[in-house]
Image (cartoon, rainbow, N blue to C red):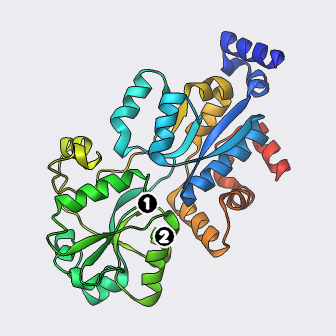
Amino acid sequence: MKIKKLLLSAAVIFGLTSFGSVANAACGNISIANMNWASANFMAEVDKIILEEGYGCTVELVPGATMPTFTSMQEKGEPDVAPEFWANAAIVALNKAVDEGKLHSINLAPITGLGEGWWVLPATLEKHPELTTADAILKRPDLFPHPEDPSKGGFHICPPGWNCELSNRNHFRAWGMEEKGWAIVETGSAAGLDGSIAKAAERGENWFGYYWSPTALIGKYNMQAVDMGEWGGKDNWDNCLVKPEQECADPKKSSWVKSEVFTIATDNFKKTAGSDGMNYLKKRVYPGPVMNGMLVWMGENQAEGADAAIEFLKTQEDVWTKWVSSDAASKIKKAL
């Protein structure tokens, strides 16, 4: 332990970029948030293998969800890394934490082709081609019966603890959906949300609700994004739509904000993993089609993120070897 501390001190004093081998030796214990959805789980497992096998870190994966993880990183400095942090609902607090030096936004686009919003299945548009906008859909709750009360339209939202739960509940009020004959479908979990889509698609039924891309389900079922109209303004979004209901008294209609998804890390990660770890996370960008492909593979093989990480590292060398040094790449390949 004393040697490790001395090496880290030397690396900090003389510059990590000049002492790559020292930085590797100094890489100690790192914790990574293993978020409760497939792409984030997959990314955490890839990060674990690369940081351990390529750069000599000891990595612990800890369960996480967007807001609880962010709060813990901000207040307790742990976990050290959130690989796929959807920042829209916490952008003000995140910017403040970055300005204070508590957190670092290392990668501002870890996956290409991202987007959030409301979606329908293509079979719905084949039967009702006019239902391309939110306004048009909300006039037809009869076409999307709620599973517990078919007299109302069912609007599927994200599970508790996700940023999008708050924003969807506020959107529900902003669009006057209750008055128009709609009720929220409480999906309960990521599996519940995914299952509701798969069930509807396979039965040829209509489905309406929140989802995001890139994901396996969007690709598998060719889901279609709903036009939500004009952007309702930054103040409406930042100070109302993403807040708890008691802090959002008068929500206004709005399209979904442009998705801001970052890889964020604590100051401890910067110090512990050094320049090698920081550079890896900065370069680590998944092309949307590759991510979609891995998520489909996970679904078809009933695989967890750990299995998908190994499959990815074995079959997508042309992607991930660009993120790491040649020495690290050689070590990772030998470990697989």
Q: Position of residue 311 (x, y in %)?
A: 72, 62
Q: Is 139 placed above or below 7 here?
A: below
Question: What quarter of the picture does the N terminus occupy?
Answer: top right
Q: Is residue 40 above or below residue 83?
A: below
Residue 176 x/y as whole percent: 15, 64
- Nearest the eye: 125 or 195: 195
Q: Name the residue at 73% across, 28% down.
A: 27
**For mark 2, what is the residue?**
192
Residue 247 visible somewhere in the drawing: yes
In which quarter of the view is residue 296 placed? Answer: bottom right
The residue lying furthest to the right in this view is 334
- The residue that label 1 is drawn on is 159
x then y, percent, for residue 313? 72, 55
Residue 274 vertical placement versus 169 (above, below): above
Using the rendered image of the protein, determine whether residue 129 is visible from the camera's viewpoint. no
Above or below, 103 against 124 in this view is above
**Given the image, on which type of amino acid does mark 2 rest?**
Gly
Q: x, y percentage for residue 99?
A: 40, 23
CB atoms of marks 2 and 1 within 8 Å: yes
